Amino acid sequence: MLALAVGVGANAQTKYFFSPEGNGDADGSSWENAAAGEYLGASVAGAEVGDEFYLMEGKYAPDGTTNKWNITQGVIIKGGYPTTMTGTNTDIDYTTAGQSVFSADLDNDGKGDNKDYAFVYVGLAGQEGEKKDGQFYKDAPLTQIWGVTFRDGARQDGKYWGNMLFAKHTKLDLHFCKFINNIAPEAQNNAALVVWGSQVRVFDCVFEGNRSPGAGSAVLIRARESNSSNTDEAGGALNNTLALFERCEFTDNATTGNYGGTLSLADTGGTLYMINCTVTAGTVNRGGVIALGGAQNDGSNAPQAYLINNTFVNNVGTDKDKWVGGAYRAGQFSTTYFANNIMVNPAAADNYNSNKSVVEIQYGTCKVQTAGYNIFGTMNLNGAGVTFAATDKLTTSADDVNTQEKIFGTSVLANNGGFSQSFMPLAEQATSLAVADLQTAVAAWNMEKAVTDVMDLTVDQRGYKRAATTMSGSVDVNAQAPATGVENVAANAIQDGIYYTLQGQAIGKDFQALPSGMYICNGVKIIK
């Protein structure tokens, strides 16, 4: 047990099992002998690349000497396992599993206690506050976290350094995680998740009830340095942050500031990808619940956003005097790629003759490319030379506003299958877009390999297989639910090189990024 707690790298074992209270011999060798949760913080801090940690559901406290989590890069943490687990079995269906909780409310008084630090840090060891270290995420080993709830963060110091989870110059994949009730004090701009000079890919996650006075409440994305000018030693601009959100839900995240009520990509901050996501009930003063920053005056290092198969519903700005871009706002010189999205508000919040647009393309220097089949509420283009595809459905008059009621009827956010909640569009809103045509159009956008390796446009937000002719938005009402059982999955898995769990959940094409377990690919069972 001492070897496990002090430094797991000294042990030949690379898989460790934990429960909140510990079981049996508590040496971490199996579920029956799971180590106690009080040792998990020190264990992950002292781990080596490739070590794997498996956690039963329940609450876990951080390292007792630091009161925070310092997670070694290159490890795998998988939580949410039920108390009925036996042996060293690690199979799990995350659509029905529990969660392992990392809460910053250490004294159980309902308030976060991480006053001057990010509660969870993944990055260069001992470098959380450093502004210049000359390193990039490209050299970092991939860290993976599955089935963990991050909640109650309340950092009171360290602007932009993360309220709950700070990812700095690292590669991090998050699967089936939740960020809940992380509330930054009024003095700081700190999102629940801050991505800083990193590659962070987020799959099947939920962001709900997070708050910040500005610059994103759920997610803040920044480039290598802490300032927006972001230049290297030779004066050249750096644009090295990649943030992917696939099959995620963002609900009731808010800021009292002007940009990024839910998510903010800072000036010169990098590239944002959102695929099969639902963004709803977000609030911002003005400048977009999802806000894309601008670039330097010469347009170099301009941020980019790729938005594919998303649903934005009921996201509003509170400023009554300015065009606010409630759902989405793009800054100067930025480029936005739209394909197959729905961006609408309730009729009461989207009057064609008012100043409360759903989408704001803020400057004439902005660029917009569309692959079509987008459904937009009101838009404020500010003179930008934007050409939309003939297959986009635009609001063009006060008599024909695309509203939430028109597109979704009485549909509300609900559990419609999969891990996260979603909206079900009316069947008559089907747009007759062939999935193959969508894939072809998006391929021309030349997206980064770290995205295309794991991106799956053949499924919707729930992980259901889209119909060959699919619908706009994150949910296809005609999609087929995944089969259950190994035999059914093996027989029905699409021949597309995508790996599936035994429950039929699509989790990407990168075999090396998967933790140990059994998977289905091209109808064949594969053990890693």
Image (tube, rainbow, N blue to C red):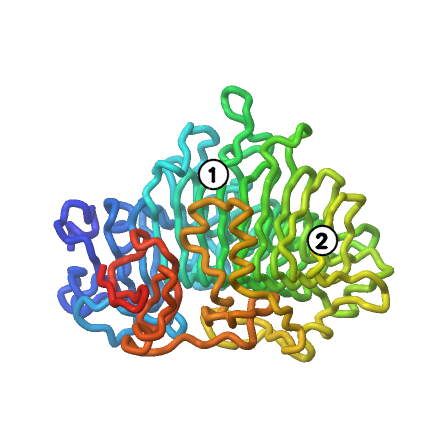
Q: Residue at x 32, y 52 (%)?
A: 513
- The residue that disc 2 covers is 388
Which sits earlier in the primary sequence, circle 1 or circle 2? 1
Of 446 and 264, which appears nearest the observer? 446
Q: Mark 2 packing: few (<14 Cα in 10 Å), some, or many (20+)?
A: some
Mark 1 residue element: loop
Q: Residue at x 28, y 75 (%)?
A: 486
The label shown at residue 197 is 1
Residue 463 occupies quadrant: bottom left
- Residue 49 falls left or right of residue 233: left
10 Å neighbourhood of mark 1: few (<14), some, or many (≥20)? Answer: many
Label 2 residue SS:
loop
Q: On screen, 74 above or below 82?
A: above
Q: Is residue 290 above or below residue 73?
A: below
| Residue 95 horizontal side relative to residue 7, left or right | right
Q: CA distance from mark 1 to mark 2?
A: 32 Å
Q: Is residue 458 left or right of residue 403?
A: left
